[in-house]
Amino acid sequence: MSKGGDFMSPREILEKFIRAFNEEDAESLTELYAEDAINHQVALEPVVGKAAIRGMFEASFNEIRMVCIVENIFEDGEWAIMEWRDPLGLRGCGFFHVINGKIVFQRGYWDRLTFLKQHGLPIEV
């Protein structure tokens, strides 16, 4: 538990997120989100709600193998922020707004074109 009470800190939630992501564990990832959470990877449309977020992770993990290698983690109040890279050299950052031990909003920045090319996925025009 966090020093601030009964809930894990934003940093602790982010560390659990990273472990579950790297294990491709959509169920554990989903449990970190509030029911009405929003996950907005800016290269894509926002995904709203815990069930939709779970579906997004399941579909992604079924399509390709993704690995998050953390370069930096920062915590500021209700926010945890990370800079990351993957084994293929893609870099990005993520912002996680955590209230009462649950992610209520997540925003991620990364280059979608590079991601698609690296994984041999179709490039939409």
Image (cartoon, rainbow, N blue to C red):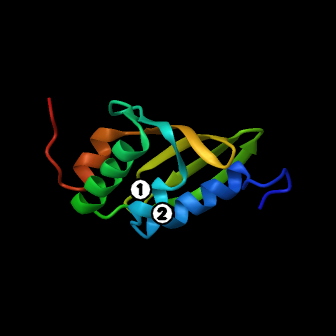
**Which residue is label 1 attached to?**
89
Image spot of residue 26 (x, y percent) = 39, 60
Residue 69 horizontal side relative to residue 86, left or right: right
Say which mark, if any, is on residue 1: none
- Residue at the outermost right position: 3
State which quadrant residue 78 falls in: top right
- Residue drawn at (33%, 30%), measured in percent from left and top? 45
Q: Is residue 62 left or right of residue 124?
A: right
Q: Residue 24 at what x, y percent from top left?
A: 39, 66
The amino acid beneath tag 1 is Gly
- Mark 1: secondary structure: loop
Residue 12 can be seen, yes or no: yes
Work out which residue is located at the far bottom of the displayed protein and give it.
Answer: 23
The kind of residue tagged 2 is Ser
Residue found 41% across the figure and 66% down from its top: 25
| Viewer-proximal residue among 34 and 112 | 34
Q: Is residue 1 above or below residue 9?
A: below
Disc sitting over residue 28 in the figure: 2
Asked whether the viewer can see residue 67, the reply is no
Comparing 40 with 48, the one in front is 48
Image quadrant holding the N terminus, namely: bottom right
* Horizontal and vertical percent position of residue 29: 47, 58
**Residue 122 image point, x, y percent:** 13, 45
Q: Counting other residues with Cα less than 10 Å from the Cα at mark 2, is it few (<14), some (14-19), or many (20 or more)?
A: some
Dot 1 crowding, Cα within 10 Å, few <14, some 14–19, many 20+: few
Tell me which numbered mark, 1 or 2, is placed earlier along the sequence. 2
Residue lying at 30% horizontally and 57% vertically, measured from the top left:
58
Looking at the image, residue 12 lies above or below residue 82: below
Q: How many marks?
A: 2
| Front one among 30 and 91 | 30
Q: Is residue 55 above or below residue 111?
A: below
